[in-house]
Image (cartoon, rainbow, N blue to C red):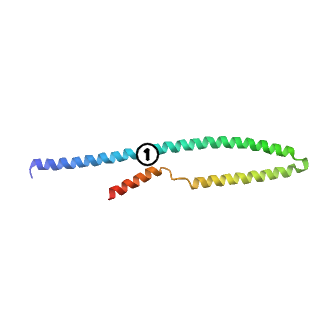
Amino acid sequence: MSETETTGTHSGHTNVLKRLAGSALGLMHAHLGILSIELEEARERVLKTLVLGVLGAGLLLLALLAITLGAILLVPEPWRAYTVVALVLVFLALGAGSLWMAWNGIRHAKTPFALTIEELRRDKEHFLR
């Protein structure tokens, strides 16, 4: 084999490796872009949910306090103890229901970074063909 044939073959392999590395870097760049977008969306969603949850809980607490005090003061004296017990039971039931719904929401939440995982799966299938 002459020197030019060896150099040509070596150059061909180098070009293939460069293109393969470029393709891999391109895929990595695309996946990192999708991942960064999903991370930003998740961060914004969590922050918004947290702020709204704290604000809503505070306002509901103030409303419940006003309703409780109003109900206790409007009920005749002999019935006030029963009113307090009934209100406590209602608040416990509502709180337990809210916590149960929150827990179900967490358990059935969409998988984080689903788009990135799907893209990686498609790339894997493409390369294995």
Q: Residue at x 43, y 45 (%)?
A: 34
Instruction: Tell whether 55 sits left or right of 128.
Output: right
Q: Residue at x 59, y 44 (%)?
A: 49
Q: Residue at x 77, y 53 (%)?
A: 89
Categorize mark 1 by other alpha carbons within 10 Å: few (<14), some (14-19), many (20+). Answer: some
Could you say where residue 45 lies in the image, as x and y percent from the top left? 55, 44
Q: How many marks?
A: 1
Could you say where residue 10 lies in the image, as x and y percent from the top left? 18, 49
Instruction: Tell whether 100 sits left or right of 123.
Output: right
Using the image as rendered, state which of residue 2 and residue 23 is in the foreground.
23
Q: Residue at x 12, y 50 (%)?
A: 5
Could you tell me which quadrant the C terminus lies in? bottom left
Using the image as rendered, state which of residue 45 and residue 103 is in the foreground.
45
Question: On the image, numbered disc 1 is attached to which residue?
Answer: 34
Seen in the picture, residue 122 relative to 59 is either above or below; the reply is below
Could you say where residue 39 lies in the image, as x and y percent from the top left? 48, 44
